[in-house]
Amino acid sequence: MKSVLDKSSPNAVEPAVLKPLRLAVAALMPVFLILTSVRLMLTPAFIHLEYSMPGFPEDSYGFNLEDRLTWAPKALEYLLNDAGIDLLGDLRFEDGEAVFNERELRHMDDVKRLVRLALSVWTGAGILLIAGCTLLARFGGFAALLRALRGGAIASLVVMGVLVLTLAASFSFVFVGFHRIFFEGDSWLFY
């Protein structure tokens, strides 16, 4: 049986074709991995884990742990389904007061749009990454696939390192900049 790298093989692919494919796989890995972590944060398990962490700050406006674990999953449900903003707008406390005010509802609507975009990019990156890895393994062999995955791992570490350093150096600047880019007006500003 001939190797796929053997020029006489009908499956042989020129190295000039494999290089862009390796680079694409390496470039898609950080996108996919970062958005995978975002998707994992959009789970009930993450909500419970985060709120159960020792030292998690108390809510200065009165929500206790039980309140948080009651209302946060409802917000998560809204972000991940096709329901309109009424799903959150109709939520009421026992005294009949709305759980979300108008400003918070506008923000959640913006968040839902961003979450949908992020999950679409995540899905697309995952599909392209699987396709790229499959093509590399098929036409470039295991060594070409490993080289691409190593490049992707290095790129992922660099991107994540830059993100961590940037956030550590100036969280407020990044936080405000992110919200000004992705959200309309000042709906994201709360007490």
Image (cartoon, rainbow, N blue to C red):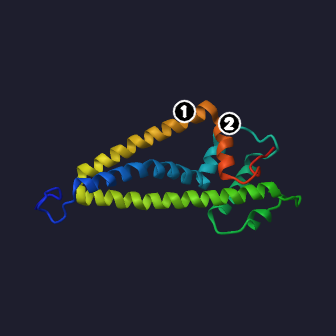
Q: Is residue 141 left or right of residue 53?
A: left
- Residue at the spot 39% in from the left edge and 43% down from the top edge: 153
29 lies above or below 126? above
Foreground residue among 180 and 191: 180
Viewer-proximal residue, 77 or 16? 16
The x and y percentages for residue 150 are 33, 44
Is label 2 in a helix, a strand or a loop?
helix
Q: Is residue 60 among what the camera can see?
A: yes
Q: Position of residue 142 (x, y in %)?
A: 24, 52
At x 83%, y 58%, the residue is 93
Mark 1 Cα shell of 10 Å, populated few (<14), some (14-19), many (≥20): few
Q: Secondary structure at mark 1?
A: helix
Tell me which amino acid carries mark 2.
Answer: Ser
Report which residue position mark 1 lands on: 165
Q: Please tell me which residue is depicted at 51% across the width and 58% down the height of the picture.
A: 121
Q: Which comes sooner in the sequence, label 1 or label 2?
A: 1
Which mark is on residue 172?
2
- Quadrant location, the N terminus: bottom left
Quick check: can you spot residue 76? no
Where does the image place residue 113, in percent across and percent down from the top left? 64, 60
Give me the C-alpha separation between circle 1 and circle 2.
13 Å
Q: Quadrant of the C terminus?
A: top right
Say if mark 1 contacts mark 2, CB within 8 Å: no
Residue type at mark 1 is Leu
Report the side of 20 relative to 79 (left or right). Answer: left
Q: On the rendered structure, is 121 left or right of 60? A: left
